[in-house]
């Protein structure tokens, strides 16, 4: 079965500092990877998705960027964090033979202070 | 693109009663409809899904029904228990949207002991 690893699990960063969140996927050959953000008490906002190495699509303009240096690695970054970047960041991927279903990693809690 | 809406935003039920959450979607070509449960502080987890060639699917106390004509689908939880308290997200995917899931904004279900 598929496993999605995210780290760090929790972090507190000052405004203006850089950010790097990492996601790695094991147990699946499906290359689609997604980054979602969930603000406190809100819904799931799709930030980026990738269909393969070096292929990134952004859903909304923002202060963040994503990269896919390896097939099973997806990185979310920022050069200078804003207060509004605080939230719960979730990496997701379809499971093996799951078709349209996606499964989420355990998430990374980011608080920008 | 696909637009998914959930109603009601918050639902309180007495333990043992049934809970029903309804979602509507806009794209008539949508053919896959999953439901996710998110407990406080945790990642969303898939609990049940249905494809457009089926009208109803049941898994123990949980069932999902689909009305393609009206473009809505519903989650039914029978004999609710306190551990059913969570946020529930519906989603839909369409070939016209590259089969990416479009999520609703979530329903907070509170089961009162």
Image (tube, rainbow, N blue to C red):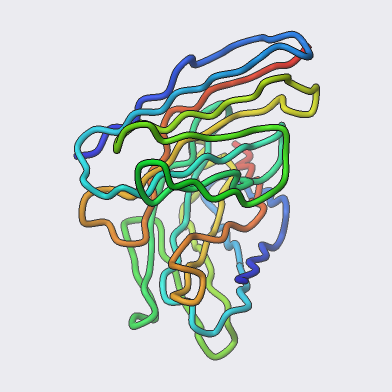
Question: Residue at the spot x=51%, y=66% of the render?
Answer: B92
Left or right: residue B69 versus residue B64 is right
Q: Nearer the viewer, residue A11 or B64?
A: A11
Could you tell me residue B16's position as x and y percent? 51, 49
Left or right: residue A71 versus residue A45 is left
Identify the image quadrant of the N terminus of chain A.
top left
Could you tell me residue A28's position as x and y percent? 22, 43
Q: Nearer the viewer, residue B25 or A99?
A: A99
Number of marks drawn: 0
Q: Residue furthest front?
A: A54
Q: Nearer the viewer, residue B12 or A58?
A: A58
Could you tell me residue A52's position as x and y percent? 35, 47
Q: Nearer the viewer, residue B2 or B88?
A: B2
Left or right: residue A48 versus residue B51 is right
Question: Residue at the spot x=73%, y=19% of the render?
Answer: A80
Is B11 located above or below residue B41 in the figure?
Answer: below
Question: Residue at the spot x=62%, y=71% of the render?
Answer: B1
Could you tell me residue A90's position as x and y percent? 51, 34
Is A13 located above or below residue B41 in the figure?
Answer: above
Question: Residue at the spot x=54%, y=59% of the render?
Answer: B90
Q: Quadrant of residue B53?
A: bottom left
Identify the image quadrant of the C terminus of chain A.
top right
Is B59 located above or below residue A4 in the figure?
Answer: below
Q: Quadrant of residue A77?
A: top right
Q: Quadrant of residue A84?
A: top right
């Amino acid at each position: 079965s598929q496993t999605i690893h995210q780290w760090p699990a929790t972090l507190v960063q000052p405004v203006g500092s850089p950010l790097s969140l990492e996601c790695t996927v094991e147990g699946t050959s499906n290359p689609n990877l997604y980054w979602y953000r969930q603000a406190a008490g809100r819904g799931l906002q799709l930030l980026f998705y990738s269909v393969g190495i070096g292929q990134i699509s952004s859903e909304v303009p923002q202060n963040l960027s994503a990269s896919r240096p390896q097939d099973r690695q997806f990185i979310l970054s920022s050069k200078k964090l804003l207060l509004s970047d605080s939230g719960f960041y979730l990496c997701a991927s379809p499971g093996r033979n799951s078709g349209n279903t996606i499964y989420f990693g355990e998430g990374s809690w980011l608080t920008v202070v | 693109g696909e637009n998914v809406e959930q109603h009601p935003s918050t639902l309180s039920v007495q333990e043992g009663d049934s809970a029903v959450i309804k979602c509507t979607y806009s794209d008539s070509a949508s053919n896959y409809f999953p439901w996710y449960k998110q407990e406080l502080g945790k990642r969303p987890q898939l609990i049940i899904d249905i494809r457009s060639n089926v009208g109803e699917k049941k898994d123990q106390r949980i069932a999902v029904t689909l009305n393609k004509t009206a473009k809505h689908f519903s989650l039914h939880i029978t004999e609710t228990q306190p551990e059913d308290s969570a946020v529930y997200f519906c989603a839909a995917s369409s070939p016209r949207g590259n089969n990416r899931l479009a999520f609703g904004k979530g329903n907070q279900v509170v089961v009162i002991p």
